[in-house]
Amino acid sequence: MKHNFGAGPCILPQEVFKQASQAVLNFNDTGLSILEISHRAPEFVAVMDEAINLVKELLNVPAGYSVVFLQGGASLQFCMVAMNLLPEGKKAAYLETGVWAKKAVAEAKLFGEVEVVASSKDKNYSYIPKDYSISEDNVYFHCTSNNTIFGTQMHSFPQTNVPIVCDMSSDIFSKEINVADFDLIYAGAQKNIGPAGATLVIVKDEILGKSGRKIPSMLDYKIHIEGESMYNTPPVFSVFVSMLNLRWLKAKGGVAQIAKENDAKAAALYMEIDRNPLFKGTTAVEDRSKMSICFVMENPELEKPFLKYAEDKGCIGIKGHRSVGGFRASQYNALPITSVHVLIEAMQEFAEQNA
Amino acid sequence: MKHNFGAGPCILPQEVFKQASQAVLNFNDTGLSILEISHRAPEFVAVMDEAINLVKELLNVPAGYSVVFLQGGASLQFCMVAMNLLPEGKKAAYLETGVWAKKAVAEAKLFGEVEVVASSKDKNYSYIPKDYSISEDNVYFHCTSNNTIFGTQMHSFPQTNVPIVCDMSSDIFSKEINVADFDLIYAGAQKNIGPAGATLVIVKDEILGKSGRKIPSMLDYKIHIEGESMYNTPPVFSVFVSMLNLRWLKAKGGVAQIAKENDAKAAALYMEIDRNPLFKGTTAVEDRSKMSICFVMENPELEKPFLKYAEDKGCIGIKGHRSVGGFRASQYNALPITSVHVLIEAMQEFAEQNA
């Protein structure tokens, strides 16, 4: 039995794997594979509609917002956001909380001025900056809600009149959010949405069409909205599996219910990290992520043996990113709490053996 | 039994569906789904390497060319090509042979001057223009090798010193090509490569880096080449299934062998179209596509009944695009000749019944 703590692409529910596997052989009793049906077939148009409606329902997306599935991952959004929203000669504010935020800054600079309003680089991105102001001459404020590599998460967002753009790749659908607080939300699918290859964008319609820039069709949010996520051939299978996964989430009780489970999983692991004399967390306690839990060992020489010990128990994907070292246990929606317990037991047993 | 003549996403080999379905449950005996493994896992890096090497082997890609798998479909290539290759104030030549070629022109115009060297719009794109010249002040010449909507195909390419960029979305891997004749080839996966969601690019390295333009990272071929198609999270499943499909093609005898089968399938159907008094082709005979076979009925009132008749025999996806009407039978690599025979029989029986 494997316990998949991988950072993404990551674990999805076992029943979603079973349904997806079946649809590769025979989709919806059409006698055809989901891989060979036309994206214009009514059966797939229904899948796309259901996926979009599930996003709206699960997140209570208010009127005036559009939901689209695109390709290219969050990385393509780094440039699309600026290309669509930042007029030449204007300025956007960015909060630099890690590697992905920094990449978003670099791409935005190709299209206008960028003001990094705060950065936690001074302490290797181990906290979320809070004392900063966003001047109103910024066209938008961009932030990354969860930092997979460094293990921090924004548990609140600034109060500002400046439109907020948020990269929620690694914590969307993990907890309740108020979509109306944001003007554009984007997320690569491969954490809590579905398999790699799809990208979700939720955007307030009124902020679009104001950049004064000629935008290539495939990079223009308005074109994808008008095309109902089918301006060109969409990533059919990734959207299909995302739909299955959102159905699973709805059946489970939705975002409020999964948030409780995620809270319990995170609380259990952090409690062990704080209790166990061999381990310690790497981030400011108040900024700890509930999705990406980073920790190291007091004695770095024990890290390799512990990694092996945990892997022998089936815990995979827990090696930390080289920027932080140690361990990173990603606890996405589909990871059962029983997997967290296995990891905790491994930590306890290892501590006894190395007391 | 369904006979899938769909234009794309389209039929893939049944054994590929079986292998893909199995890998969604348990990939490569890892105990994990292909949908939950990290793209950095050695098992997936091996998949990406094999996919790229199969492309190189099956098409005899010469030294000095790079092969990458991207996202966004051929539609994103329309702007990426111009963004990467066309310096501001310079000119590129485009051959307008259909809807996709026209879209490529529109996107390129955002980045420089476009000279449409010839167009077959005058006859609803029913032929491939041949009498045109490409002046050497063009930075590149762009063409579409197969026109899915109109059923034409370029059976030869112009002799020119100008670098040739070719959208081969719908006929790559269907026949032998000399890659050295081209400087950049691109293709959406969803015909003869694999499922929707991946895009193949084969590019001569020396033409890159000369646009003088600052290109967003995700739109810069050089960045994807340096990142070995993993600059960001790739569309894991689409690349995996593409690899399986290219393996199938190799085991079958490669491109030379499939070309023979495609020739036989196309010859059989065109013979029936020409022989059967009820039907007629829509394109110039010398430009007929072997992948996308378009035909109409002498009596348009019989088209709806024939569509139903053919569908009752299991032939699906044969309704023509609204720009041409009538029928379009796409005969991609994985379509067995037995399916073509079923369609031909339906045409013959229908003719007898409506003599």
Image: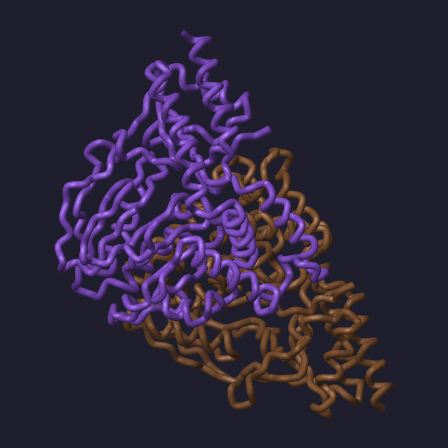
Chain colours: A purple, B brown
Task: List x then y, in percent, for residue A177.
Answer: 34, 49
Residue nearer the viewer, B346 or A205:
A205
Residue occupying image coordinates x 68% and y 75%: B318
Nearest to the observer: residue B342 or residue B134: B342
Residue A136 spot, x, y in % from top left: 14, 58
Q: Is residue B178 visible?
A: yes
Check the image and report above or below for A115 versus B285. above
- Residue at 38% x, 29% y: name it: A267
Q: Is residue B183 left or right of residue A41?
A: left
Q: Which residue is depicted at the point 18% across and 58% down?
A: A161
User: Is residue B215 something one can see in this rendering?
Assistant: no
| Image-quadrant location for residue A130 | top left
Position of residue A329 relative to residue B183, above or below, is above
Q: Name the residue at 50% across, 74% down.
A: B100
Residue A86 occupies quadrant: bottom left
Q: How many marks?
A: 0
Using the image, determine if residue B124 lies above or below residue A245. below
Query: Would residue A260 be found to the left or right of residue B54 on screen?
Result: left
Q: Residue B86: x, y in percent? A: 35, 67
- Across and down, in percent, residue A16 comes to 58, 46
Q: Quadrant of the N terminus of chain A?
A: top right
| Image quadrant in which you'd find residue B117 | bottom left
Question: Dividing the image into 4 quarters, which one contains the C terminus of chain A?
Answer: top left
